[in-house]
Image: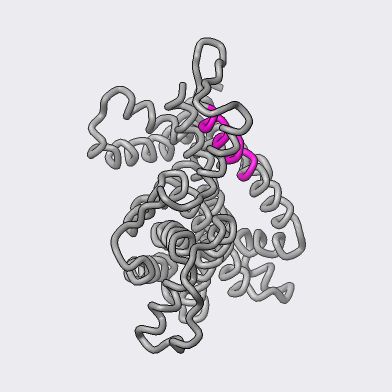
Amino acid sequence: MTLLLSAWTVGLILALLALGVYISFRLFSFPDITVDGSFALGAVLAAVLMTRGPHQLFSSLSAIYLWPAAWIPAPGGIHPIAASLLAMLGGALAGTCTGVLHTRFRINGLLAGILVMTALYSVNLFVLGKSNQPLLDVPTLASYGDALADAAAGEGTRLQFLIWELAPHEVALFGLSLLLVGVAVVLLYVFLRTELGTAMRATGDNAQMITALGVDTRNMITLGLAISNGLVALAGALFAQYQGFADVQMGTGMVVWGLASVIIGEALVGSRQLGVALIGAVMGSALFRLLIAMVLLVGLNPNYLKFFTAIFVFLALVLPGRLSRLRALRR
């Protein structure tokens, strides 16, 4: 049961990534490959800011003469909430770069995402200074969740749920992840129902119509990609804190995860209505992670995990259409 609870927690954290992919993939039909780079960027920025603080970033900029050495702040990590929010801002900047390349320089959307993703790999190495960074010795949101669980249930205790025993810290992290994702879904739903959010959705539905109403679709696409990659980077920052380390390659294949979550979610809820679709993306991410955990539980070699992930995505893409045709033939 602990393994399943951990899988759901990771699925909820990565639901933020699914929400980001939903914006680019469903609202704008934009194949945004930037996701792979911005996820790792969020993890790297959060790790550096929590362990070494802004000192590391400004020292690196000073080394290439982009920042005066006298302005470098003192070393020291910052609070994980602030680090996560700044990581989200970094992801939004990456999405903005993709949007500008596509809308202002008229580069194909897929190619623009590939360009930014490729550049982000070097940026992540530059910021981190090495390939990975452990987070075991610094306060993180996960360690705060552990401390909260110990304070509430007592250190070393186990919680009984029916026939299963649960670790209090896993329950606490699951509850915090569920709360965070719930807040993100509500805020995103409210924003997309505002005048600006409606203009963004209309840009994806009918660009010619919204242009005739005086809306600059280029700005809408750029803003949408910024929000999308901001959510992806936030997911990366939280995932790194949950895993206890950040790695420059941890974003590989994350765009596939996001697409699979969105598609599975749509198959679960059977609707593309805004509120239902957002909830479906969260459900799809949790279910997809549960499927991966079950595959690992039966003894699959982790080296084959990407292959089975591709199989799951293929089935999620094909099965809904096949089932709908089968139902139509029966009628």
Residue 100 in the magenta stretch? The answer is: no
Kindly identify the residue that appears in the image at 38 percent across and 33 percent down.
292
User: Taking 150 as reference, is 239 above or below it?
Assistant: below
Q: Quadrant of residue 208?
A: bottom right
Q: Residue furthest right?
A: 195
- The residue that appears at 69% across and 68% down in the rendered structure is 210
User: Range of the magenta residues?
Assistant: 168-180
Residue 131 location in percent, x, y?
Answer: 29, 60
Position of residue 132 measured from the top left corner of the image (x, y, whole percent)? 32, 57
* Foreground residue among 38 and 244: 244
Q: Which residue is more in the foreground, 279 or 28?
A: 279
Would residue 170 be counted in the magenta stretch?
Answer: yes
Q: Is residue 33 above or below residue 14?
A: below
Q: Residue furthest top?
A: 163
Taking the spot 40% from the left edge, 70% from the top edge, the residue there is 116
What secondary structure prevails in the magenta region? helix
Q: Say above or below: 155 vs 184.
A: above
